Image (spheres, rainbow, N blue to C red):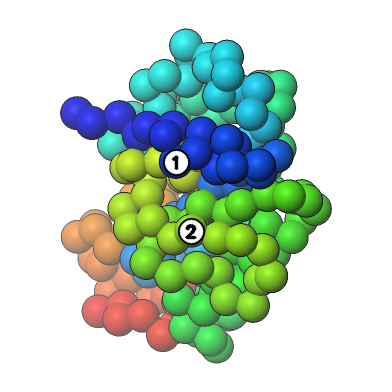
Amino acid sequence: MKIPTKSIERSFFNSGFSRVIGVDEVGIGCLAGPVVVCAISFSPALYLKPSKKLSWIRDSKLLSEEKRNEFARILMGQAGIKYSICYSYPKTIDKVNIYWAARKAMKRAVLNLKEKNAIILVDGNLPIQNLSMPQKAVIKGDRKVFAIACASVLAKVFRDRMMKKYAKKYPGYGFEVHKGYATKYHYVQLASLGPSKIHRGSFRLS
């Protein structure tokens, strides 16, 4: 399995940037719950002396829950790293659509870091709109770029924890298992219980 590389980040550090920010989102295709974004900022130090504990990090979808939690703990305790997590609730998703809801959260997450002389590496084919900072969009960046993969892990861990809390508030849907994604069980429970307050009305629920 191919592991995300650090070559893009190193090239930007070599060109004079003092920070590299990886950005990714989770929850785009869910029927319920927020879309969650993480922006994670790295200094050159972590790239000069890479942590062996993070050498096998990759796209959160390719990791077990146990490994995601382990990597998240390491990232949150690592020197030279700052991160910001933002999200858009279902009401916002229904109002502006999932794409713009995710983009709004991305912009907030990046601005919360208050970084200077930084470049943003964002997962996808477009940069974050209305953001006056250098950016590079990378298609399937969570599988190619170390910084983006790290962002995907933190965003996934944070969102999963949110959905487990929602499972207690809205029991019966199985949020603690499928995290709001469109599983067969989720559809069955939707048909039986009807939508909860965290279901996205603009998504097809049946």
Is the residue marked by circle 1 packed among few (<14), some (14-19), or many (20+) residues within 10 Å?
some
Q: Is residue 90 left or right of residue 138?
A: right
What separation in Å lies between label 1 and label 2 (alpha carbons)? 10 Å
- Residue at 43% across, 70% down: 126
- Looking at this view, name the residue that lies furthest to the top: 52
Viewer can see residue 141 = yes
Q: How many numbered tags mark residues here?
A: 2
Mark seen at residue 136: 2
Where residue 47 sits, quadrant-wise, is: top right
Q: Position of residue 30 (x, y in %)?
A: 37, 64
Q: Position of residue 143 (x, y in %)?
A: 32, 42
Q: Earlier in the sequence, mark 1 or mark 2?
A: 1
* Relative height, residue 182 to residue 81 (above, below): below
* Relative height, residue 117 to residue 53 (above, below): below
Residue type at tag 2: Lys
* Relative height, residue 98 to residue 53 (above, below): below
- Residue at 59% across, 42% down: 15
Instruction: Name the residue that disc number 1 marks.
Output: 8
Q: Tag 2's secondary structure?
A: strand
Q: Nearer the viewer, residue 76 or 107?
A: 107
Q: Position of residue 113 (x, y in %)?
A: 75, 50
Position of the N terminus, as image quadrant, is top left
